Amino acid sequence: MPAAPRLAVIGHVEWVTHTDAPFIPAAGEIVHLKDPVEQPAGGGAVTAAALARFGAEVSFYTAVGNDLPVAERLAALGMRVLAAARDRPHTRALVMRDPAHERTIAVVGENLHPEIGDPLPWDELAGVDGVFFTGWDPATLRAARAAPLLIVTARRFTPLVESGVRADVLLGSGRDPGERVDLDRLSEQPDRVVETFGRDGGTDYEAVEPPGPVVDSYGAGDTFAAGLLYGMATGLEWREALAYAARAAAEAVTWRGAYPPPDRQSDW
């Protein structure tokens, strides 16, 4: 059996409260939220946890506040947590799931990102099989480029521009205004650009039917990123890696919140 790929994620984690909302309020309205569930989540954490579920050895480079057991909870998900300590409260987020199972997110405070000056083993990135970047410090992105495979979220386009490095894949939602990019700003063009469109598929791939009822869209895009990185790092051809990612994202919408329940079995 081939060895598990060694992969890394650079980015943020939020302490998320998932809730159910009968509707998403407009300005001036009041909504009563139900059934709160708390967990560390956010783009970096969800991607790292998904990679661990797929069987990778995962190092998650992040930063954490001083008031919540973020690192401990993340480690329980199967990843190696490399967390820079910040002397401030950790970033929180409120997620409202509407009756159509779509999520609306409100982030409280600025995301905490690792920086190149943090005492983390940045030199190890040269020895991993691939990196997913959703951080903010361009210097950490330059460190990540030492890996043979680098996927960057379009939401971090500004650090990519400032870093001057080439991404193997620039990945973003075609429906999210925050992930629209101007490739002319890049000094090094990415090898591939992938846009995702949820149930309508995306660049070079078709969407996969979920293996059960749709419960919650939270984390589907991050899980897609994990699937693509894992597929490429394990040697799948381009469209095969995208198909793997689409399958992973389809499964992610069948549970509530960022992660499957402990008793949930997967055939990864």
Image (cartoon, rainbow, N blue to C red):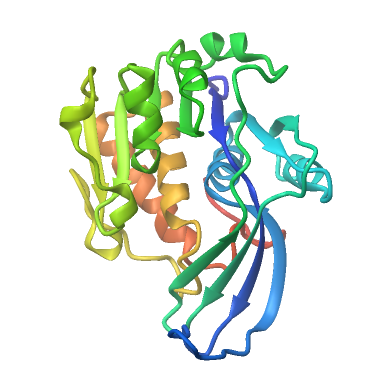
Query: Which one is in front, 9 or 16?
Result: 16
- Determine whether 215 is above or below 238 in the image: below
- Determine whether 194 is above or below 238 in the image: below
Q: Residue at x 55, y 30 (%)?
A: 10
> The N terminus is located in which quarter?
top right
The part of the image, by quadrant, that contains residue 198 is bottom left
The part of the image, by quadrant, that contains residue 66 is top right
Note whether residue 256 is visible.
Answer: no
**Horizontal and vertical percent position of residue 261:** 67, 62
Total labels: the figure holds 0
Q: Residue at x 30, y 30 (%)?
A: 169
Horizontal side of 75 relative to 162 (left or right) equals: right
Q: Residue at x 51, y 34 (%)?
A: 135
Q: Residue at x 22, y 51 (%)?
A: 202
- Determine whether 241 is above or below 23 in the image: above
Query: Which one is in front, 227 or 64?
Result: 64
**Horizontal and vertical percent position of residue 78:** 71, 39
**Horizontal and vertical percent position of residue 186:** 23, 24
- Determine whether 30 is above or below 261 in the image: below
Horizontal side of 151 relative to 82 (left or right) equals: left
Query: Which one is in front, 6 or 154?
Result: 154
